[in-house]
Image (cartoon, rainbow, N blue to C red):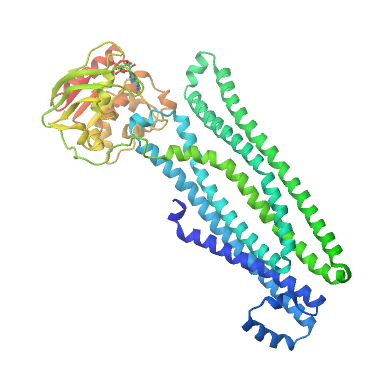
Amino acid sequence: RLMLRRPGRLSLMLTTGLVAAVFEGGTLGLLGLSVNVLTDDTVMLMEELPDFLDNKLGLYLQNISRGGLFLLLIGFAVGAQILKGLLSYVSMIAQIGLSYELVSDGQNMATGHVMNMSYSEVTKYPSGQLGALIDQSGMISQIVTEVGKASRAILMTLSYVGVMLLMSPLLTIAALVIFGILWVALSGIVKVLKQLSVRAIESEIDTWRWSIEYLNAPRLLRLFGTTEVAKDVIHEFRRKRIAAEKHGAVINAAILPVFEIITVFGAGVFLICGYLFSGESAIKVVPGLFVFVLVFFRLKPQVKMLSDLRLEMAKLLPRLSKVGGFLRIDDKNFEKIGGIQFKRLTSSIQFNDVGFCYDGSDTNAVSALSFEIPRGDTIALVGESGSGKSTIVNLLLALYRPSLGEILVDGSNLGVIDSSTWRERIGVVDQEVYLLNTSIKENIIFGRQNISDLDIYRAANTALAHEFIENLENGYQTVVGDRGHKLSGGQQQRIALARALVSNPDILVLDEATSSLDSISERYIQKAIENMHESRTIIVI
Ligand code: ADP
């Protein structure tokens, strides 16, 4: 489908390939003719020409010498070959353009797919696995290369077979039998290569997955002295992938010599049989036989290409089916787009008999939960770890949908409200702060539009972060390091609070947001929250 979205390039690739094949067949036909002109009194191929051409050509040919005709035919053959070369080149260029466009189409599609997935869906995949799948989506482009090669090889093969049939139907059948035997002989190899490819792609995805997982935990790996273990795990998956690929390559390497031996053997058989059967007139037949062998040897790379293609597809298909399975949309949950645009909380948020169970869990994380949060109130959720506080926040943020009951926002079911406009009005500070390895300013903005410097200073001030940020070497431009490691836990949490406040949300959710603060900062933040609560609905865990 992606390929059909670019019909211009696709049809250019196919038509130039087709015309090139016709010229290729024409070249060989002309060469056959020219040899016959020199060796035979009755020009063999001339009999095959349609009547109207025969008459005109016949008239013309009567007027030129045999040598002149030979030169003329050779001239045409060279011209046709030059045109064939140019057209093949155009076909290749179209194929290259198409395949690079498909790399980006495929990877953009996969990236978009990941970004559009619902939170509950995307968290099913380890992040490294997502990285690997996005990367592998570029593989789609190889289909173009294979289709391009296949179309050219099939057309050329047809045109060679046509020329061969004109020259000798019997020898053509013999040639096709030789290639047929080769084709069947390769079937077993194709099967083995397919299995090896499945093993290679699975190990490759695992290599990515564990690399990303361990690369994200540099501190823990060193604290627990497990860098060697991490290295070994990653090496082992890579070893499996390389072993499978190497094994495949070794099998592949045997194909070329087998091909060469069988075809050279076949060509020898043609020449010898042709010579023996023609008896007296052997001298006359031999030049024609040489042209036949020439055609046979031009046909060989095309058949080789088709056979390689089969092997390539055997390797490619398992990868594509992994990517295809991932890109399917009918078995995945996506973010709901559209619905009632949320502007501002006017009366209250209500949980009515809400129950929720995470996928794959057999106990409810929350059940029969009812409460109301009037606009402008500050409420606290208190409970022991695992009692379901964060789950309530996840449900409130529409990251998950309740399994039972309903959540009402100003009387409307949260399910019919557009999630992005709803979340825009909520500022969240999570237990675990995630900072990007970029400047403090970028971390506070976090990709959102229409946020002025003044908004940033105001938010940082409220979050009691402005002062310490100004005291850093580069102020708001200071880069915080991987996951913010250059800042203290309390500083990171205050940046996260500024990030939540900068869009001036109606509702503020603080999920143990003061857990990393020292008692003095915590008191400051509590003071800040008290100052804010006039205008905001605040939920504190
Ligand atoms: P709290 O925030 O009060 O510590 P949570 O809301 O995080 O509690 O968790 C409530 C229950 O749901 C716990 O038993 C926890 O194990 C389970 N839970 C939390 N997140 C998930 C998840 N993504 N998948 C499955 N179970 C989960």
Is residue 5 positioned above or below 228 on the image?
A: below
Q: Where does residue 289 sit, x and y in percent of width and height? A: 79, 65
Is residue 114 positioned above or below 463 on the image?
A: below
Camera-side residue of 538 and 201: 201
Residue at 69% in and 44% down = 185
Q: Quadrant of the C terminus?
A: top left
Is residue 64 positioned above or below 1 on the image?
A: below
Camera-side residue of 226 and 55: 55
Q: Quadrant of ligand 1?
A: top left
Residue at 52% in and 32% down = 205
Which of the 4 image quarters holds residue 162? Answer: bottom right
Q: Where does residue 284 sit, x and y in percent of width and height? A: 84, 72
Residue at 60% in and 65% down = 87
Q: Where does residue 235 sit, x and y in percent of width and height? A: 60, 25
Q: Where does residue 272 sit, x and y in percent of width and height? A: 85, 60
* Number of numbered markers: 0
Camera-side residue of 455 and 318: 318
Most distant residue in the right direction: 280
Q: Is residue 528 visible?
A: no
Which of the 4 image quarters holds residue 380? Answer: top left
Which of the 4 image quarters holds residue 341? Answer: top left
Q: Is residue 108 visible?
A: yes
Left or right for 524, reference 476 = left
Residue at 54% in and 14% down = 225
Left or right for 255, reference 380 = right
